[in-house]
Amino acid sequence: MALSVENLVIEAGDKLILDGVNVTFPEGRITSVIGPNGAGKSTLLKAAANINSNYKGRVLLDGEDIRSIKRSDLARKLAVLPQGMTTPSDITVEQLVDYGRFPYRSWFKRGNPQEDKEAVEWAMQVTNLGHLAKRQVASLSGGERQRAWIAMALAQKPRILLLDEPTTYLDIAHQLEVLEIVRKINMDWGMTIIMVLHDLNQSAKYSHNLVVIKDKGIRAEGSPQDVLTKEFLAEVFGVRAESYRNAMGEEILNPVAVIK
Amino acid sequence: MEKFNFMHSNKWRISLLGVFAFLALAGIIVSIGAGSVYISPEEICLSLSGEGSGTNDKILMNIRLPRTIVAALVGINLSLSGAILQAVMKNPLADPHIIGISSGAGLAGIMVLLMLPESTYLVTPVAFIGAMGAAVCIYILAWKNGIRPIRIILAGVAVSAFLGAGISALMIFYSDRVHSALMWMVGGLSARSWPHVEMIYPYTIIGVLLAFFGARHINILQLGDEIAKGLGLRVEMVRISLTAVAALLAASAVSVVGLLGFVGLIVPHAARLIIGSDHRFLLPGAALLGVAVVTFSDTFARVAFAPIELPVGILMAVFGAPFFLFLLRREL
């Protein structure tokens, strides 16, 4: 199931955010969207997920305009986690994850209880939440809560998962935990992942494909090895970086100074 | 840990609903029984099964029973309306009275009462139009890159003040017919009888069914607009439909008892504190608790200062206004 964006133009008020973006997110791969603050990364993600449908151009899911797909049908194919979720004060992890089954229910029908149960259990197992099923979401740590939201999205059984900065506000251990889960979902189930990330080295380590946004458009696109270079960091982020190889042979970029 | 889990299980919530149902029933029995003439529960049972006789039977069938039924239905309508509005407007202080939806219904209803006194059957439909109009105004005024709770309240206060001025103007123009309208302004159940039951019950049935069907959608809406859209909810459509249901419930209550305030604020909050925010339980809980609160309050207002009968609206305001301030300090 392929997701792509054609001539996307998005304005917020009278300010142009994205101006004619074309990008295809490769199927079954992890794509990270990176770029400076305010470049329009989240804006792109929200349009791609049809959370915001106020744009010019088209978002295509298997060649079909995403705005013409029924919302509940779309939600079975594509799940999205925006930033800054409000967690209801008194629901359990299990209940939250169960909300992911909403697209499979209608006004009158309850859906298939057996399928729902299996999907919820699977989602909690993938995100290592089984032992926390009966806990209140509000009582969880930041990392556990983020995993609970990811589990909710997984319970939708989507083919494509979009995540907007899934690691923000988490400490480093929980960041890695979330990214490992993302990688596992992609490897074991072939789910297409599109995420906005801040940390360049993490984006290099955990994604197959990078999309770089700057100045209202796509600046670069390709594998992390091709995209992330010292020259690139100087040009896009305005920082001078040193590179070295770590013990695992991975190339690490270490930004050391702002270029004045 | 075991107990902690049980407190959040559906079994626990269902048993709480049982307690609420008991309170509602108690309120109904007390409301029928208490007053200048005491009617015992045995007599109530006899009368209800059609075997009653004598003066008490007449008092019960013609005065107490219809008034109690109106009180119960009004309690259901206002509580559900408040519970829905609080969820849909993302605002803990939303209540049909405070944000001006009742005033919209009130202005429209009083127009009919004063200008077309013969057409009382028009009161509820016209009041519904007024309530919807007020709701739309509040949304438009409060809308600026999404809805913020505080803007809803401020817009509601403005709309409410504007509509209140309209009501006052009408009462000056039609000062000869003003008494009926005056009682309406305060919100009371005095002299409510079978015709009033007939005015409200169809709307209660429709509203309750629609509200309960919408419970799962309200739950999703509570996760925030973006998450709700991601889960496939047509957020705008659901929000408009639910607001219409809330307006219908409030308008039909206002048509019958006037501007009875704070029920829609206090009851959903109390229900949420006790039963939690899962609307599949919260909505029925609020409805049952609404029955209990309005029937008990009306009985108290009737009996406490006998022979003077206090409009129940005054009683609700005395308890409701401080509660509103308490919520204001805690939640905004």
Image (spheres, rainbow, N blue to C red):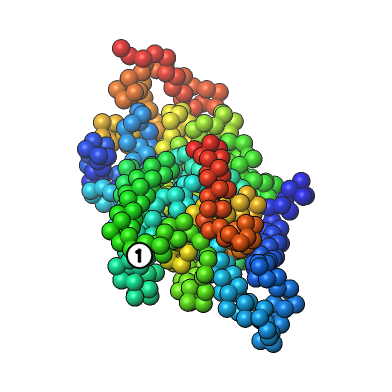
- Residue B58: which quarter of the image? bottom right
Disc 1: which chain? Answer: B
Which residue corresponds to the image point at 73% horizontal and 48% vertical from the top-left? B4
Q: State whether residue B272 is above or below residue A43.
A: below
- Residue A1: which quarter of the image? bottom left
Which residue corresponds to the image point at 34% horizontal and 45% vertical from the top-left? B158
Residue B300 seen by the camera: no
Residue B270 seen by the camera: yes
Please state if B150 lies on the left or on the right of B329 as rendered.
Answer: left
Of residues A48 and B142, which is closer to you in this image?
B142
Which residue was labeled with disc 1?
A: B177
Of residues B206 and A108, which is closer to you in this image?
B206
Relative image position of residue B219 (x, y in whole percent): 52, 55
Q: Residues within 10 Å of mark 1 (few under 14, many from 20)?
A: some
**Which amino acid does the dot numbered 1 rest on?**
Arg
Which residue corresponds to the image point at 70% horizontal and 70% vertical from the top-left? B38
Relative image position of residue B59 (x, y in whole percent): 62, 77
- In the picture as drawn, the residue positioned furthest to the right comes out as B2
Please state if A235 lies on the left or on the right of A119 as rendered.
Answer: left
Which residue corresponds to the image point at 53% horizontal and 45% vertical from the top-left? B321
Of residues B50 and A224, which is closer to you in this image?
B50
- In the picture as drawn, the residue positioned furthest to the bottom comes out as B51
Of residues B153 and A210, which is closer to you in this image?
B153
Relative image position of residue B273 (x, y in whole percent): 63, 49
- Residue A173: which quarter of the image? top right
Please state if A16 lies on the left or on the right of A249 as rendered.
Answer: left
Secondary element at tag 1: helix
